[in-house]
Amino acid sequence: MKFIAEINVMPLKALLDPQGKAVTHSMHSIGYKSVENVRIGKHISLEIEADNEGHAKEKVDEACKKILSNPVMESYEFEIRPMN
Amino acid sequence: MKFIAEINVMPLKALLDPQGKAVTHSMHSIGYKSVENVRIGKHISLEIEADNEGHAKEKVDEACKKILSNPVMESYEFEIRPMN
């Protein structure tokens, strides 16, 4: 069975997010004064073959820990859905 | 009223995604043979002050077009929810 995983990898909230700060300032400078706390991370989508959704979840979780995120500086979350 | 926007900015599907290809290959090399079509983009979260959800949506959509994505190479999608 094929599944699609939609993964967000974000900088840990406790860490400084210079990129997010920079975008917040530039948005203010072009008039978006009402925007705050911009945080920027990675969005990763992938297709994965697995026997069932639980198995797909296990593999994606492991891949997030091992290769797609850096646990020292980043957190991750993901959603999985069957591919139609 | 304060809202949180969760935005995904991804490379257009028609375009080559070298970063995604590279990650697909490295995942295969460490044993994730069942993973295909990895695509990597940006996940942006931000807080925005607006009178109502519709107004917040308008502003975020405009910001995505003007500053957060490059329409020539990227597509975007976002969700908005009230901040509790």
Image (tube, coloured by chain):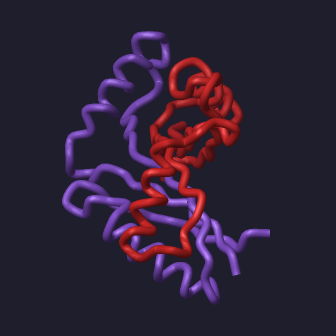
Chain colours: A red, B purple
Residue B50 vs residue B17, the one in the foreground = B50
Q: Would residue A1 be found to the left or right of residue A55 on screen?
A: left
Residue B28 vs residue A52, the one in the foreground = B28
Q: Would residue A13 be found to the left or right of residue A19 on screen?
A: right
A60 to B70, vertically: above or below: above
Which residue occupies 54% across, 86% down?
B55
Which residue occupies 30% across, 29% down?
B21
x and y, in percent, of residue B45 in the image: 56, 57
**Viewport quadrant of the N terminus of chain A:** top right
Q: Would residue A45 be found to the left or right of residue A81 on screen?
A: left
B57 to A84, vertically: above or below: below
x and y, in percent, of residue A24 in the image: 48, 59
x and y, in percent, of residue A68 in the image: 51, 27
Which residue occupies 55% across, 80% down?
B56
Q: Would residue A67 be found to the left or right of residue B22 on screen?
A: right
Residue A1 vs residue B75, the one in the foreground = B75
